[in-house]
Image (cartoon, rainbow, N blue to C red):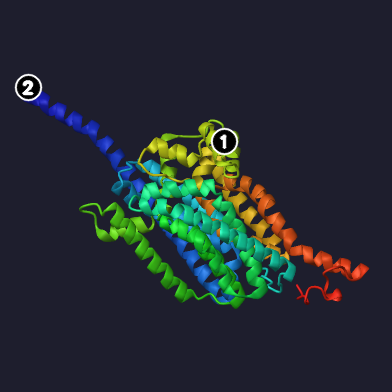
Amino acid sequence: MQEYSQREAVVATRKSVEPQEKAAFLTQSFAYILGLVLDLALLCLAVNVVFTLARDLLKNRWQILFEVRTYLEIYAIAYFVLPSLLLVQVNEIQSWNFGTSTLLLSKAISLFFAGVVVILCSLGKMGRRPLSLDFRPSLFSARIGFVLLGVIVLYSAVVLLSTSAKLVSISNDRIASAEMYLDIADAFQLKKVQFLLLAAATIVFWRWRNPIVFLAVVPLLALELLSGGRTTTFFVIVFVYLNLVAKYHKVWAAKIAVVLVILLVFTTANRLQYQGVVEGRDLLQAFTLTSLGEFIQTYMTLPYLLETGTVSSSPILQMVAVSLAGLLPGSLRATLDGSFLSPGSEIAAMIGRGYGLAFNSITESLYYFGILGIILAPIVMVLLARLVESTSRRSGFSGFVFLVLFIVYLRLLFREGVFTYILSVPFVYTVYFVPLYLLVHIKASRRRISRQFGPTVGSPGLGLTGGSHPN
């Protein structure tokens, strides 16, 4: 009788466990299939972008590099699609321990965001208006630009000589070097200096068509390289490359690819040597994760927000404060940061992994505005790009300068966030670009006055300037 009762208990237990096991099996199977579908969709999106850009490169050649949609699509794939495809592996290797539902939701949101960007870029006439390069800055503008360039080079050299010894003394400590460089850049306003230097160098370059003028960036690059950084170097290389492409109408795709591969291998190997390869980890795996570290570590704040539900307590106020903080002096910005941390700094402090975790467009949108932000952000992003591109292509040389600068800094739109970027653009435009715009156009205004009222002092008609060149 006792054996019969035990047998009944076992049967009853099996009957109660079997539905649970079946439900768990079905849930795991559904999650696995959904993950495969999302990965396949992400892969198809990436392949579509690659083939589209390759086709346009063969068709439009160098003009494609001055189409903002080219960079929107590339950054969408790099910052959202690639990390999504590697998300499961990164979650396991780096011990993030996010749940399956969080990983799937991260992939789905990334697919939606990147897909909307790519689709909107393919609509309308974005990037289809040829870039006109029938311009040449006036001699007057070029001379002012040359003087400005000389002042900036002298200033950069003084900063380099006065701070390089400190950077060299701590060069073995990469984190300390990076922090010191940020302090130096903030104290001497090097970001603003870099912006003015590039714009002035462009004016001088397009007047006399001599690439040697871009050597003016060496002091600024040397200062950053001493600290082990590469952000400024990236910006400057892209900027100079775009100007050379516009002048010579050549892409140099093979040469650029070789240079990029060499830089990638050496910088990644250097970081692996500095960090040390984790024992037991496959070297290829470590190399892949390290080389894509910029995109992966930027992306991992998305599943973290989804997992923890972290949002901004005062989104509008924090967003405005963070956007304007970069334009303020260091002491005032430090006071402001005490009340309104940037989202990336706030999340990095919460995670506590010992290094910064930057936001991206998706994370920023989710942090400030939730699902509504994720829906609006890609639309706003593409509309901003369309506005800048269409305006720049109709504004002659000054429009070209602004277009190149916008392309160079477009990465920050993905790296820091759409709404933060948009709020800072009007101030940057007003403070830096308007004076350059006036500088470029002032000679033309003087010419019209001369034609209406006769020669003026210093005009070619009086023979006091040694002649002049047309715009």
Q: Nearer the viewer, mark 2 or mark 1?
A: 1
The residue type indicated by label 2 comes to Gln
Residue at (49% x, 69% y) in the render: 51
| Residue 327 position within the rendered picture, expressed as x and y whole percent measured from the top left | 60, 44
The image shows a total of numbered marks equal to 2
Indicate the amino acid at tag 1: Gln
Eyeballing the image, is 8 above or below 48? Answer: above
As rendered, which of 67 and 169 lies closer to the eye? 169
Q: Which residue is mark 1?
A: 318
Instruction: Please tell me in which quadrant of the rendered image residue 123 appears.
Output: bottom right
The dot on residue 375 is: none
Q: Which residue is mark 2?
A: 2
Residue 138 visible, this orientation: no
Decide: is 392 above or below 423: below
Q: Quadrant of the N terminus?
A: top left
458 displayed left or right of 381: right
Q: Position of residue 249 (x, y in %)?
A: 59, 77
Residue in the image at 61% along x and 55% along y: 382
- Tell me the element at label 2: helix
Q: Is residue 229 left or right of residue 368?
A: left
User: Residue at 57% of width from left, 48% of height from top?
Assistant: 418
